[in-house]
């Protein structure tokens, strides 16, 4: 936990209340913290997470070791029995970069990123990609596990519904308010994406962003899952990637001002395929692994704070099914890919 | 119908807390409708739909938290808002105005007649603080682990020189002058003294001593490494010496995992010289060897406790297999396994207490084949992934690798609850075996955490044509704050078979999982 | 400094450094206890600490 700051001036022995080594730094936050000097301030403090608002825009987080890695996170080992609060973290403390240290406040906390490994999401799975039948089976496992273990306070109830039930207006009236309000717009959104009707897309999105409980509202988590899964499937199965990029860009153009700043950041990141490790890992297992792995990965995501995991999974489910149902086209592509290997 | 809206501007609470608040409020008396959401445009629509939107909420922005309540009357709202505040500020529990010294020295200034220092700071620093304390003439109880063996030796030798007790490092439990230090169960004061290098071992022994109608004079914890070669049993010997000299102590128990041979000889030599009855439990140690050195040995924690109690009453110690009539036990087991599907065959032991887990491994090894674990007795048996069971599996959920960054499983039951459900889904799982440890430092209501998971697991099994057997033992007394009887009743109502001790629970589990074929080994060879 | 050998005969008076639930539990048992609001000394820097100790003739 402790260490001496290495500085060019030997007379300088800077001492900090706490000095911690970071073992991982996400690709996006690495970029945002690259300049020396004051770079931002503490935006919010939680038990295992501290968020930073950067002067040049955007957010990032310093997280304790029980929190997963991600593009926006710097992961540090916090000593047992301590957390962000006992480390002295408070809102509005300044955040600076000095040599290889990220320094919080005047001297409250120094984080050494010297030995942190750069974490970048893997977006192309190449050789290990599964055929679409297996992907479909994995999606069913995803749904089954989410139904059993998901938290249903957000949009989770929708996971339970079959294709027919989703379109049944009577069933809709039995739903809790959040899924009830979301459902018609959710279905519209899927429709506009399918029919490439980008002009009508914003309206559906606007009714979903910021909707529901949680610091990252349920609707946002759904959109995150949706954007990520569409992007990853399009990229890996070589479907209409340009269309999906357009879709994601249109979605995030509707975001500013409509949700919390933290959620905004996550949505922006998801549009380009950046997300936390558990979520990316889940998508990877869906596209490359067997159902036991999918189950494990799903349960890890479900354990993410509150309803976030469940709502994100709903988005992944819808996004994946959307892409897979892209007619025979999808199946043809896979068949021809496999033919090349025969 | 009274409505009130609370807006917390620019406030960030994580989703888990928000959900917790939401659920807590909804359950309160008199609350008709509640919403705890960030004030985004769409959530305002939501509030409108719930008839909860009023001016203040309308003016709020997406980074503001809105707590909207609709209740029967003002009193309900007030109560709810108090509860919200309580949940939101729950972290900060220190009384206002209390000033805390920041160093040991200033604490000693504030309390000059202090005689014990409890240390639970990170390993690096724990040794320093302990040294300071011993030099200032204070006894030490050290909960911290991750202290080097060299430091431990130095500290214990220093303590010995100064005539002080060094309990630890890595000591979770002690009872000194009837005060529980660290974790521990409320037991009757009495005449039996204990020296233990095994936390939950001390707990199991002390609670059974209590239920046998006896009591504890002193229970000295010495930390997990005391009987290693390097440390040489310094505090075990010192503890033994003190209990010898203590007038209130009339019988002595020594508990530890198998010590280094040289250390074992030293300890047994000292124990055999004792004028007071002593029972030695080296958890899996060689009972014949212990006897040959002139001491009374016991194979299980339960037998240890019962042995000392018997000796104190001038009776012959009798090892127990089961308290109940063996015929009844066999029938009970049959009832459980008769509903198994063909695939069901494995025991999954999910333990929070390290010593209890160790005892389970010792007892299961001769009874079950293919026994795996995350901290096994031999390297052949090691699980590749502690989170995934293979064959018969026993897991110590309190071990270093599984507790990294999380609270200990005796306090935080989430990991174990998830694991219970996980095991229940697997078709080969026949029996789930659990320890439930009560007392200070443990969860306030373990049953309330376990029962939903157990119920879910059992239902899942039932849906798939299986029967999941769940066996548990509770380490606790009627004096513990968790209400032992209530815990037992609740677990039994949920279909759990609660056995009087860890050893008996383990044996029953093996009997059931092997569909009775372990019977011979159990009853004939008295394992 | 009182003679703390043979603590068995004395009323426990405890200084707790670290986890605050230990302090709470002792208070529940009506034991006199002082809680130390511990922070790593010298900003957590072990090298610095050793220097300080040398100076203080520890």
Image: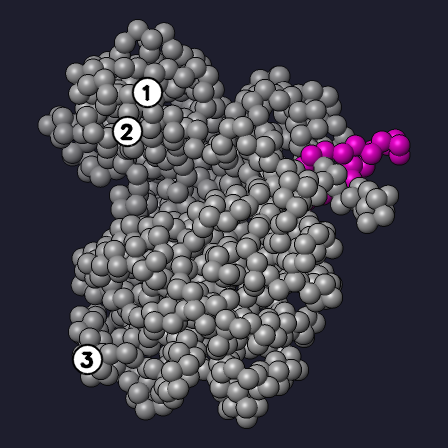
Chain ID at mark 1: B
Q: Secondary structure at mark 3?
A: helix
Q: Is residue B523 left or right of residue A105?
A: left
- Answer whether residue B443 is magenta in the image: no
The x, y position of residue B56, in whole percent, is 33, 8
Q: Which residue is mark 2?
A: B25
| Secondary structure of residue under mark 1 | strand
User: Residue B248 at x, y = what percent?
Assistant: 50, 71
Residue shown at 81% from the left, 46% from the top: C53
- For the point 21% across and 73% down, the residue is B337
Circle nearer the N terminus (1, 2): 2
Mark 3 burial class by Cα count in 10 Å: few <14, some 14-19, many 20+: few
Q: Is residue A18 above or below residue A338?
A: above
User: Are labels 1 and 3 on one chain?
Assistant: yes
Q: Which region shows up in magenta?
A: A1-22
Q: Is residue A229 visible in this depiction of the protein?
A: no
* Residue displayed at 44% across by 29% down: B89
Badge nearest the viewer, 1 or 3: 3
Structural distance between the alpha carbons of marks 1 and 3: 57 Å
The alpha-carbon separation of the residues under discs 1 and 2 comes to 10 Å
Residue A204 found in image quarter: top left
Identify which residue, B22 or A218, lies in the foreground: B22
Spot the residue most to the bottom.
B292
Observer-nearest of A81 and B279: B279
Q: Quick one: which residue is furthest to the right in this view?
A: A10
């Amino acid at each position: 936990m402790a260490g001496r700051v290495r500085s060019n001036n030997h007379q300088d022995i800077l001492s900090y209340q706490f000095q911690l080594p970071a073992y991982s730094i996400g690709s996006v936050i690495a970029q945002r913290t690259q300049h020396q000097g004051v770079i931002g301030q503490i935006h919010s403090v939680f038990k295992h997470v501290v968020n930073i608002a950067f002067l040049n825009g955007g957010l990032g987080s310093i997280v304790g070791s029980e929190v997963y890695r991600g593009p926006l996170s710097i992961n540090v080992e916090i000593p047992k029995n301590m957390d962000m609060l006992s480390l002295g973290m408070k809102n509005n403390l300044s955040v600076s970069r000095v040599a290889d240290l990220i320094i919080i406040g005047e001297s409250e906390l120094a984080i050494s990123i010297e030995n942190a490994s750069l974490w970048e999401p893997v977006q192309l799975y190449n050789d290990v990609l599964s055929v679409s039948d297996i992907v479909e089976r994995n999606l069913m496992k995803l749904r089954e596990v989410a139904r059993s273990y998901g938290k249903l306070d957000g949009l989770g109830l929708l996971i339970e519904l079959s294709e027919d039930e989703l379109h049944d207006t009577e069933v809709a009236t039995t739903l809790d308010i959040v899924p009830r309000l979301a459902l018609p717009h959710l279905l519209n959104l899927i429709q506009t994406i399918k029919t490439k009707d980008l002009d009508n897309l914003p309206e559906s999105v606007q009714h979903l962003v910021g909707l529901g409980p949680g610091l990252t509202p349920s609707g946002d988590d759904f959109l995150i899952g949706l954007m990520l899964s569409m992007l990853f499937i399009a990229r890996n199965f070589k479907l209409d990637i340009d269309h999906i990029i357009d879709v994601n860009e249109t979605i995030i153009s509707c975001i500013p001002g409509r949700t919390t700043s933290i959620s905004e950041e996550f949505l922006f990141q998801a549009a380009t395929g950046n997300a936390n490790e558990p979520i990316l890992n889940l998508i990877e297992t869906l596209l490359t692994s067997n159902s036991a792995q999918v189950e494990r990965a799903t349960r890890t995501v479900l354990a993410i704070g509150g309803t976030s995991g469940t709502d994100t999974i709903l988005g992944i489910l819808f996004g994946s099914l959307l892409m897979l149902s892209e007619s025979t086209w999808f199946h043809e592509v896979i068949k021809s890919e496999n033919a090349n290997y025969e | 119908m009274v409505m009130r809206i609370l807006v917390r501007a620019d406030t960030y609470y994580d989703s888990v807390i928000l959900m917790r608040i939401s659920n807590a409020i909804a359950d309160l008396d008199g609350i008709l409708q509640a919403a705890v959401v960030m004030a985004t445009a769409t959530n305002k629509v939501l509030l409108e739909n719930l008839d909860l939107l009023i001016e203040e909420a309308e003016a709020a922005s997406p980074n503001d938290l809105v707590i909207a309540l609709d209740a029967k009357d003002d009193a309900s709202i007030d109560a709810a808002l108090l509860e919200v505040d309580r949940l939101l500020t729950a972290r900060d529990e220190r009384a206002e105005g209390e000033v805390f010294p920041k160093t040991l020295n200033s604490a000693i200034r504030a309390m000059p007649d202090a005689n014990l220092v409890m240390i639970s700071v990170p390993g690096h620093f724990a040794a320093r603080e302990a040294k300071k304390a011993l030099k200032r003439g204070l006894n030490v109880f050290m909960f911290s682990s991750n202290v080097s063996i060299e430091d431990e030796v130095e500290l214990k030798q220093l303590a010995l020189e100064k005539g002080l007790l060094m309990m630890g490092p890595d000591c979770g439990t002690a009872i000194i002058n009837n005060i529980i230090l660290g974790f521990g169960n409320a037991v009757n004061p009495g005449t039996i003294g204990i020296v233990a290098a095994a936390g939950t071992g001390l707990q199991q022994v002390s609670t059974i001593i209590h239920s046998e109608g006896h009591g504890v004079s002193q229970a000295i914890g010495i930390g997990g490494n005391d009987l290693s070669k390097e440390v040489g049993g310094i505090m075990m010997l010192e503890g033994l010496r003190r209990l010898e000299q203590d007038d209130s102590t009339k019988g002595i128990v020594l508990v530890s995992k198998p010590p280094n041979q040289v250390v074992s000889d030293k300890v047994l030599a000292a124990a055999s010289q004792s004028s007071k009855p002593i029972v030695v439990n080296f958890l899996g140690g060689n009972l014949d060897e212990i006897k040959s050195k002139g001491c009374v040995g016991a194979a299980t924690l339960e037998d240890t406790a019962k042995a000392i109690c018997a000796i104190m009453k001038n009776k012959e110690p009798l090892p127990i297999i089961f308290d109940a009539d063996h015929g009844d036990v066999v029938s009970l087991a049959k009832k459980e396994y008769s509903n198994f599907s063909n695939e069901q065959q494995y025991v999954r032991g999910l333990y929070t207490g390290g010593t209890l887990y160790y005892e389970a491994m010792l007892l299961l090894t001769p009874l079950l084949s293919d026994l795996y674990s995350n901290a096994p007795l031999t390297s052949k048996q090691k699980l590749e992934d502690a989170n995934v069971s293979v064959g018969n599996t026993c897991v110590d959920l309190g071990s270093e690798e599984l507790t990294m960054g999380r609270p200990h499983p005796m306090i935080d039951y989430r990991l174990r609850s998830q694991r219970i459900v996980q095991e229940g889904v697997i078709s080969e799982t026949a029996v789930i075996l659990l320890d439930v440890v009560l007392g200070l430092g443990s969860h306030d209501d373990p049953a309330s955490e376990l029962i939903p998971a157990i119920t879910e697991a059992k239902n899942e099994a039932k849906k798939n044509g299986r029967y999941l057997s769940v066996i548990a033992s509770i380490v606790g007394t009627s004096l513990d704050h968790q209400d032992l009887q209530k815990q037992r009743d609740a677990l039994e109502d949920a279909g759990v078979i609660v056995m009087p001790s860890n050893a008996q629970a383990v044996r029953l589990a093996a009997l059931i999982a092997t569909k009775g074929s372990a019977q011979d080994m159990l009853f004939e060879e008295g394992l | 400094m009182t003679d703390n050998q043979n603590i068995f005969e004395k009323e426990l008076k405890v200084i707790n450094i670290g986890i605050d639930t230990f302090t709470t539990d002792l208070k529940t048992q009506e034991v006199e206890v002082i809680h130390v609001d511990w922070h790593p000394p010298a900003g957590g820097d072990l090298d610095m600490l050793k220097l300080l100790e040398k100076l203080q003739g520890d």
